[in-house]
Amino acid sequence: MAAEITRRLTLHPSLTKPMLVAGGEREATFALWFVCLSIPILTSLWFIPVGLIVGGVGQSFLRSLAKYDPQAFGVVRRHWGQQAVYLSAASAYAPVKYRAPKEQAQSAASGGLLKALAKLLRKK
């Protein structure tokens, strides 16, 4: 009878749904609209309609991209950051980034404090 009982774990939807703003990925949407509205304001107010049009076209692109892959910009960011680590092809001359582990000092939990106390007591 114990084998028939199934466990269920309820997850809050915020843990499983992607963070989207106006249908596009959150960080990309904020960056797009920041650029589309700040550049016209800093240069000339006559460019605000152009910024709104470029922002609308960019937002529609972000929405269609988020329907395909809601974490696309995070994947691209990790790819750009790790290009030096993971080369595109195997090579006999690839750099080796292995470092030998250092010896760890003993902490108080592993007996380092007890050894220090034993040395003090031996001196007397």
Image (spheres, rainbow, N blue to C red):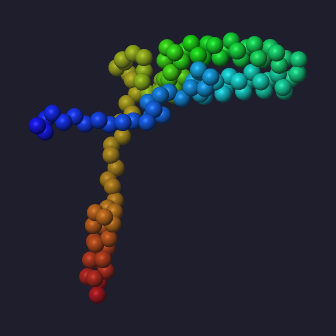
Residue placed most toward the observer, 11 or 29: 11
Q: Residue furthest bottom?
A: 124
- Rendered location of residue 109, percent (x, y): 31, 64
Is residue 83 rendered to the left or right of residue 101? Answer: right
Left or right of 72, for residue 89:
left
Residue 114 appears in the figure: yes
- Pick the residue in front: 83 or 17: 17
Q: Residue at x 13, y 35 (%)?
A: 3
Can residue 77 be seen in this snapshot?
no
The residue most toward the left is 1
Q: In front: 68, or 7?
A: 7
Figure quadrant of the C terminus: bottom left
Where residue 13 sits, quadrant-wise, is: top left
> Does residue 55 lie above or below 124 as drawn?
above
Residue 115 location, x and y as percent?
28, 71
Determine which quarter of the picture holds residue 45. Answer: top right
34 and 116: which one is in front?
Answer: 34
Q: Position of residue 120 (x, y in %)?
A: 31, 80
Residue at (76, 17) in percent of width and height: 52
Judge from the rendering whether residue 43 lies leftward or rightward of residue 108; answer left or right.
right
Q: Name the residue: 83% across, 19% down.
A: 48
- Please tell me whether residue 62 is drawn above or below residue 111 in the rendered image: above
